[in-house]
Image (cartoon, rainbow, N blue to C red):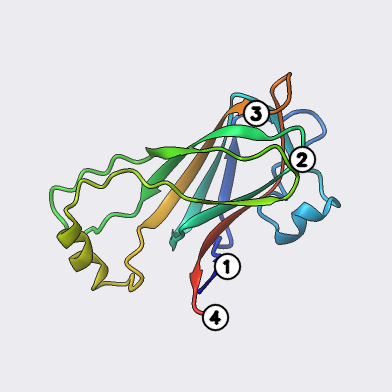
């Protein structure tokens, strides 16, 4: 089993702020970490939100920062696709899944996506994962939001070259 980028074409990127000379345009391009495209730069606190045109079964996220300008504390907010047939399911939209802590380095860093507690019993999760359009049993994501609370830079600057949303594939 290996991780591959499962980011669907047409994913909408929304950012809280952008510093002059930077761009969010190339954040989702696989080749954007090569340095030929301008990175997204901002100051902490700031946020980056991905809205998917179709739900994705993802387990990990990968960031490539500029060393020295790393978001060292990142809140991960998750919006899951809920089963439309279930009555009584409250759709809360984005829920805080947890935090991740990237290191101050310019290499690609992979993190497991922290999911919010579902409130479902383990036996219910097994039943849900056994049927439907999602044979993997993984939560289907509609949106992910990353809140960069702190930076390794003394002035709070963050420079991000790429974001990848990763899921499992049989290899």
Q: Residue at x 76, y 53 (%)?
A: 33
Image location (x, y in percent) of residue 116:
34, 43
Q: Secondary structure at mark 2?
A: loop
Q: Earlier in the sequence, mark 1 or mark 3?
A: 1
Q: Residue at x 73, y 25 (%)?
A: 153
In this figure, which residue is indicated by the disc labeled 3? 17
Determine the CA span between mark 3 and mark 2.
Answer: 17 Å
Identify the image quadrant of residue 40.
top right
- Determine which of the numbered discs, if any, sits on residue 4 in the image: 1
Visible in this render: residue 85?
no
Marks 1/4: CA–CA distance: 10 Å
Which label sits in the foreground, 3 or 2?
A: 2
Vertical comparison of 170 with 74: above or below: below
**Crowding at label 2, few (<14), some or many (≥20) Cα neighbours within 10 Å?**
many
Q: CA distance from mark 2 to mark 4?
A: 31 Å
Query: Which of pointers 3 and 2 lies earlier in the amino acid sequence?
Result: 3
Residue drawn at x 76%, y 60% as measured from the top left? 31
> Marks 3/4: CA distance?
39 Å
Q: Quadrant of residue 81?
A: bottom left
CA separation, marks 2 and 1? 22 Å
- Left of 26 or right of it: where is 138? left
- SS class, disc 4: loop
Q: Is residue 103 above or below residue 125?
A: above
Label located before the other in sequence (3 or 4): 3
Which of the marked residues, 2 or 1, is nearer the chain's N terminus?
Answer: 1
Q: Label 1, label 3: how many angstroms apart (C-alpha)? A: 29 Å
Q: Residue at x 59, y 30 (%)?
A: 16
């Amino acid at each position: 089993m290996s991780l591959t980028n499962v980011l669907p074409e047409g994913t909408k990127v929304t950012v809280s702020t952008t510093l002059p000379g930077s761009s969010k345009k190339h954040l989702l391009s696989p080749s954007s970490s090569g340095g030929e495209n301008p990175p997204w730069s901002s100051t902490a606190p700031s946020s980056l939100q991905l809205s998917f045109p179709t739900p994705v079964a993802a387990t990990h996220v990968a960031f490539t920062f500029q060393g020295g300008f790393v978001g060292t504390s990142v809140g991960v907010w998750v919006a899951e696709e809920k089963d439309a047939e279930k009555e009584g399911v409250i759709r809360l939209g984005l829920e805080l899944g947890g935090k991740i802590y990237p290191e101050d380095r310019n290499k690609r860093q992979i993190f497991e996506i922290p999911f919010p507690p579902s409130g479902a019993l383990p036996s219910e999760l097994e039943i849900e994962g056994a049927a439907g359009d999602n044979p993997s049993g993984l939560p289907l994501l509609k949106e992910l939001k990353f809140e960069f609370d702190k930076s390794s830079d003394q002035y709070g600057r963050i420079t991000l070259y790429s974001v990848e949303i990763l899921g499992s594939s049989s290899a």
